[in-house]
Image (cartoon, rainbow, N blue to C red):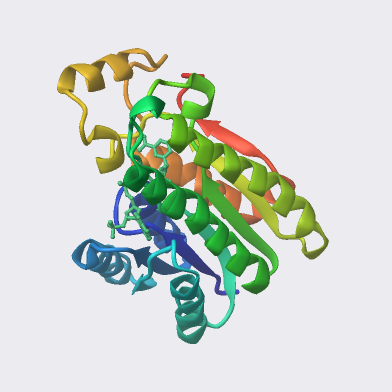
Amino acid sequence: MQKTAIVTGGSRGIGRATALLLGAHGWDVVVNYANNHDEAASVVAEIVGRGGNAIAVRADVSSASDVKELFDQAGRAYGNVNALVNSAGIIRPSLIKDLDDAGLTEQLDTNLRGAINAIREAARRVVDGGRIVSMSSTTLALNPPSYGIYNATKAAVEALTRVLAKELGSRRITVNAVAPGPVETDLFVTGKSQTEIDRMAEAAPFKRLGQPQDIAEVVAFLLSDAAGWVNGQVVRANGGLA
Ligand SMILES: NC(=O)c1ccc[n+]([C@@H]2O[C@H](COP(=O)([O-])OP(=O)(O)OC[C@H]3O[C@@H](n4cnc5c(N)ncnc54)[C@H](OP(=O)(O)O)[C@@H]3O)[C@@H](O)[C@H]2O)c1
């Protein structure tokens, strides 16, 4: 049976790799983005070029009406929605004493309100036996200075994951989170020096950063039939960093 997955933040980074992998596995993919239409269009073109099905849909996850429309467009294009992958996210590092209201609001709106908007809509619309996967972060285990608000949003995502898994259990929908370690994407490298990046790669047992594909493989597993007994869990995919 044909299945459809919505990937928020599917235009870049981890979401992009996930969208491409799901497309290669035969999913119909709805590639969500906020601003970068060309990046989203290139993901769609790559999936379609390999014989798959995909559409790009602009929606700001912090807007409940945008997220509703995202699910509406997915439904119009492919019928049922079988899975949501919540990858849209931002980081605005700041010591808590230096926090400005704009950075605070931006992170809460995208990472927390955005995740809530998406999982609420998924709880209403994903079909029985479906899948919901959200991105947390291994920074929750590391507590780096300046990651306070980011970590707070990811802790909330983990809390929501565990509760929603129980709420949707009677419909055999699994709800899980993936907590990547450092992954070489715009989100991770922006604002860091090469020395800092190299130091973080060296800190990991495998002496390298994660790649988006490392995380996409975990998400694809959680969306697969084989993962039907994995529910309410947080999978730390970080090469053994923490
Ligand atoms: N990279 C890491 O080291 C790492 C580690 C742990 C967890 N994570 C988590 O993994 C997820 C993906 O991160 P990434 O590294 O792949 O980031 P990224 O490369 O910066 O990509 C972020 C994606 O999110 C989308 N996005 C941002 N704000 C949005 C909004 N308001 N509405 C809809 N889409 C929005 C972006 O769309 P546009 O292209 O349109 O801007 C882009 O597709 C995030 O939740 C992040 O917190 C990342």
Along the horizontal axis of the image, is 118 left or right of 131?
A: left
In the image, residue 187 lies at what x, y percent?
A: 30, 40
Along the horizontal axis of the image, is 95 left or right of 4?
A: left
Q: Is residue 203 visible?
A: yes
Residue found at x 35% / y 40%: 91
Residue found at x 52% / y 28%: 140
Residue found at x 24% / y 33%: 189
In the image, residue 144 lies at what x, y percent?
A: 42, 21
In the image, residue 51 lies at what x, y percent?
A: 34, 72
Q: Nearer the viewer, residue 25 or 180?
A: 180
Which residue is the extreme one toward the bottom?
76
Q: Nearer the viewer, residue 211 or 200?
A: 200
In the image, residue 166 lies at what x, y percent?
A: 78, 52
User: Which image quarter holds the N terminus?
Assistant: bottom right
Q: Is residue 95 visible?
A: no
Q: Quadrant of residue 81?
A: bottom right
Q: How many numbered tags mark residues here?
A: 0
Would you place residue 18 above or below residue 45 in this image? above
Would you place residue 45 above or below residue 227 in this image? below
Residue found at x 41% / y 28%: 96
Along the horizontal axis of the image, is 186 left or right of 232?
A: left
Along the horizontal axis of the image, is 81 left or right of 169?
A: left
Would you place residue 119 above or below residue 188 in this image? below
Q: Nearer the viewer, residue 188 or 91?
A: 91
Q: Nearer the viewer, residue 2 or 81?
A: 81
